[in-house]
Image (cartoon, helix red, strand yellow):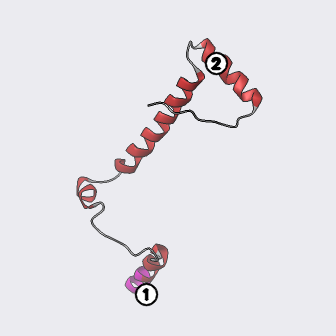
Amino acid sequence: MNTKLTLTIEEEIIAKAKKYAKSKNRSLSDIIENYLKSLTKETESQKNEHLTPVVKSLKGSFKIANEMDYKKELRDRLQAKYL
């Protein structure tokens, strides 16, 4: 399902983009859609790229309090371990 999207972009950029799209025999909408697909695809693959299978299987198993300060918790535990 396609949905209309309104963007605010400098006129000069739009003109150059339209010229580029025409030279490639593609619509500007098609180029932008494919670009956004590639951005979101990379993001999803990067999220899971560095996780081992064991970590992936545990993902979502633990709940952390919203007010937990991760950096403070890490600092406190490292100080307790090394000091």
User: In the picture, residue 65 is in which quadrant?
Assistant: bottom left
Q: Position of residue 50 (x, y in %)?
A: 35, 51
Please tell me whether residue 71 is drawn above or below residue 23 in the rendered image.
Answer: below
* Res 26 label: none
Q: Amino acid at mark 2?
A: Tyr
Q: Residue at x 65, y 36 (%)?
A: 7
User: In the picture, residue 4 is in which quadrant?
Assistant: top right
Please tell me whether residue 48 is drawn above or below residue 30 in the rendered image.
Answer: below
Q: Residue at x 72, y 28 (%)?
A: 13
Q: Amino acid at mark 1?
A: Leu
Mark whose residue sits in front, 1 or 2: 2
* Res 83 label: 1
| Secondary element type, mark 1 | loop
Please tell me whether residue 45 is drawn above or below residue 11 in the rendered image.
Answer: below
Q: Which residues are magenta?
A: 77-83
Other residues around mark 1 within 10 Å, as few (<14) / some (14–19) / many (≥20): few
Other residues around mark 2 within 10 Å, as few (<14) / some (14–19) / many (≥20): some
Question: Residue 65 magenta-drawn?
Answer: no
User: In the picture, residue 55 is in which quadrant?
Assistant: bottom left
